[in-house]
Image: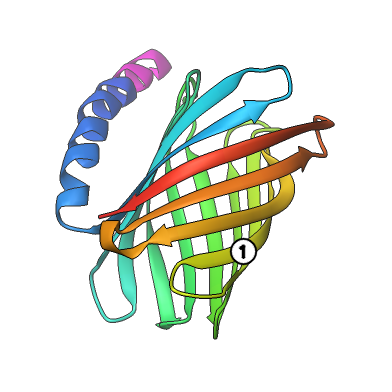
Amino acid sequence: MNVKKATRYKSFRKIITPVLVMLLPLVAHAQLELYGKFNTDGSVEPIINYYGSKKISEKFAITFFGLVREKWSQALIGVSYMPTPDISISASAGIEHGQHLPRYSASFWLKQDQNTFLLLGELGSGYKNYLYKVNMFHQFSEKISLGVMDWRYHGLGPNFRYTIPKLESTIWIMPAYDHEQKVARCMVGYSLHM
């Protein structure tokens, strides 16, 4: 019985994931991001992620998120609730590479004047299979913002962002210290808003 369920789940995942990846960005507000993690051993890990949302009412939206790494990936679908334009609460669930159990995510985003705050958590199978991301940013101008982030598997450090409005793109850099793995690293990224 479990083998049949696992086989059906794999078949469903093989069909639905490419369909969602291709169709959802066509009808939604989306962001595609490519960044590299530059490690002290000289290695560079490329990472691609995408996020999008489609409003279904004044206060609710369907959301999607996907991330692809060399050895791991995930895809999540959820809902966000925006009681005001400056507050967003979201929850999602989906799949991750190599697991038969779902992966879950929840986040809280707040904006006040030129400042933003994000608290995000993810949980997969197993007590060590989690991710957190906490950031605070201040937008100094249309093009420049500076923040601080604590991001599991990345580190704690400042994040400088330069936005190119005509291209609807942002270039960012984040030198960080990973307090779990006790190493310094730097992330450099490019985000395209669609």
Q: Does 144 sit above or below residue 185?
A: below
* Among the 4 quarters of the image, the one containing residue 136: bottom right
Q: Please provide the residue range marked out in magenta.
A: 1-7
Q: How is the image coloured?
A: rainbow
Give the crowd class for mark 1: few <14, some 14-19, many >=20 residues within 10 Å.
some
Q: Position of residue 75 (x, y in %)?
A: 39, 38
Residue shown at 53% from the left, 57% from the top? 161
From what the image shows, is residue 38 above or below residue 49? above
| Image location of residue 90, percent across then percent down | 46, 63
Tell me the residue at 63%/46% (across/down): 174
Residue 185: give x, y in percent of width and height.
71, 33
Position of 21 relative to 91 (above/below): above
Report the magenta stretch's main SS: helix
Q: Secondary structure at mark 1?
A: strand
Residue furthest to the top in view is 3
Q: Dot 1 corresponds to which residue?
A: 146
Residue 66 in view, yes or no: no
Residue name at image x 61 percent, y 52 percent: 121
Q: Is residue 162 magenta?
A: no
**In the image, 97: left or right of 57?**
right
**At which x and y percent is residue 18?**
22, 31
Check the picture and name the quadrant holding the N terminus. top left
Q: So how many labels did they put on this image?
A: 1
Q: Quadrant of the C terminus?
A: bottom left
Above-or-below relation of 31 to 18? below
Residue type at mark 1: give it: Leu
